[in-house]
Amino acid sequence: MALRFVSKSLARGHRRFAPTAKSMSTVVGYGDFPGGQKVPYVNKLTVVDPKEKDVIPAYRVLDQQGKIVEGGSLPEGLNEELVVDLYKNMVRLNQMDNVFYDAQRQGRISFYMTAFGEEGTLFGSAAGIKPRDMVFAQYREAGVLMWRGFTLDQFADQLFSNEDDLGKGRQMPVHYGSRELNYQTVSSPLATQLPQAAGAAYGFKLAKEDRISICYFGEGAASEGDFHAALNFAATRDCPVLFFARNNGYAISTPVKDQFRGDGIASRGAGYGIPVIRVDGNDIFAVYEVTKKARELIMTEGRPVLIETMSYRQGHHSTSDDSTRYREVSEIKFWKDTNCPLTRLKLFMLEKGWWSEERDVSLKDTERTNVLQSLAKAEAKGIPHISTMFNDVYKEKPRHIQEQEQEMLEHLAKYPDHYSSTGH
Ligand SMILES: Cc1ncc(C[n+]2csc(CCOP(=O)(O)OP(=O)(O)O)c2C)c(N)n1
């Protein structure tokens, strides 16, 4: 197996920054600082410049032509059935993204975000954890929820904020959640889920539960203060949490060169004493394997792990964004043509005889039809009763909120013609 852990050298900051032979400095003693920090004293002023450090490599199993790389092999646990199932789910997500993106363009839903280009990252990691593990998502991780069994009808109900939406129609589209599927409800403020994931994991540890938190976030979100709080908290409390950074090159219009100057997100793990793995995010096999490995390490060593997937956001940031305003169409085309996670997996399956072009065409048609059916059903359903918007602000409805509800109902009774009871 080609996967090797670099955790030891990365996690121990003092070793990593020990003077190199090149600097010709000599160790002239050691300082024993509180907490077991043993720091060598040297006789030459040394500036530690991260520019001189090697770039953390990304693990890869499948190359861009869909072939297993030299010295690599299909990760343990992956067989024909599971691989085909993963691919089918990637196609389903793709069709869902196509249909709902268009539905937003037609004004039928108010907002949408696609996950084009990150399907390998989502399904590879989703398959690498256990159903009991608690997911804390950012917003571009619908594939993880799909893998856990969230149905197209459930996605559509949330997108239309209808009466069957588990979130009772209160949040913007794509803010999914499912208590049953251990998927915490998405909220818009970036990175707030990171310390929450660490806290939940701490709870699992105290309760001696056999589960971890997995926390997804973009490389842009990693610039938030909450990222730093979460990693430090998780490291110092030894929380069983998997931090999963999706580095797709952009945070809306901000390219990574304006987001950070270090070696991506992975290089930050060392500073917190957290083992890291960087992986080719367009290679679903590699993502699956590193996620499984990380989970194992978290459970056996009782400490957090950080994974960084390297991929590319092929779609616009959201339906409110036209990404050709800040990046070349040729760049997007390049990634789609040469490094698409679906194409890579499909080429592999075709070569193995696990798949055919005919099955591919028919699957895409079927999934598109399924999504269109769910969309039509969700669109035809009613919206939650207006009074329900006063529920759940607190567990019990306090007097002042009851009064506001009453006031609203009286207002509606007085001016019934000015309000629709079917739309938002
Ligand atoms: C605290 C906060 N600041 C700003 C925003 C606006 N915002 C929404 S998404 C986004 C970019 C996030 O990029 P990244 O984390 O890289 O994820 P990606 O969209 O690339 O998947 C920003 C700035 C927000 N939602 N919350």
Image: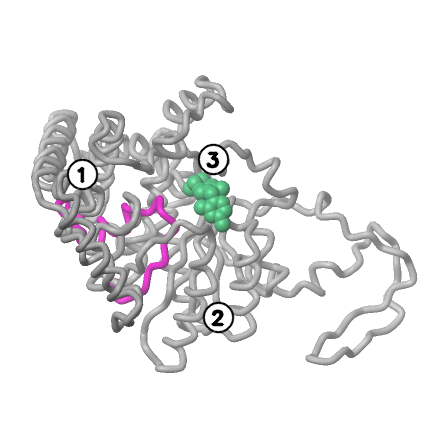
**Label 3 sits on what residue type?**
Ile
SS at circle 3: loop
The x and y percentages for residue 338 are: 40, 25
* Residue at point 64%, 65% (across, down): 12
Separation of disc 3 and disc 2 at Cα? 32 Å
Mark 2 or mark 1, which is nearer to you?
1
Near-viewer residue (106 or 132)? 106
User: Mark on residue 252?
Assistant: 3
* Residue at point 25%, 70% (across, down): 397
What residue is pinned by disc 2? 303
Note whether ligand 1 is within 8 Å of mark 2: no
**Label 1 sits on what residue type?**
His
The answer to whether residue 210 is magenta is: no
Near-viewer residue (238 or 150)? 150
Instruction: Look at the numbered discs 3 and 2 and tell me whether their residues touch, using CB distance below 8 Å.
Output: no
The x and y percentages for residue 306 are: 49, 57
SS at circle 1: helix
Bounds of the magenta span? 131-154
Q: Residues within 10 Å of mark 2 (few under 14, many from 20)?
A: many
What residue is pinned by disc 1? 418
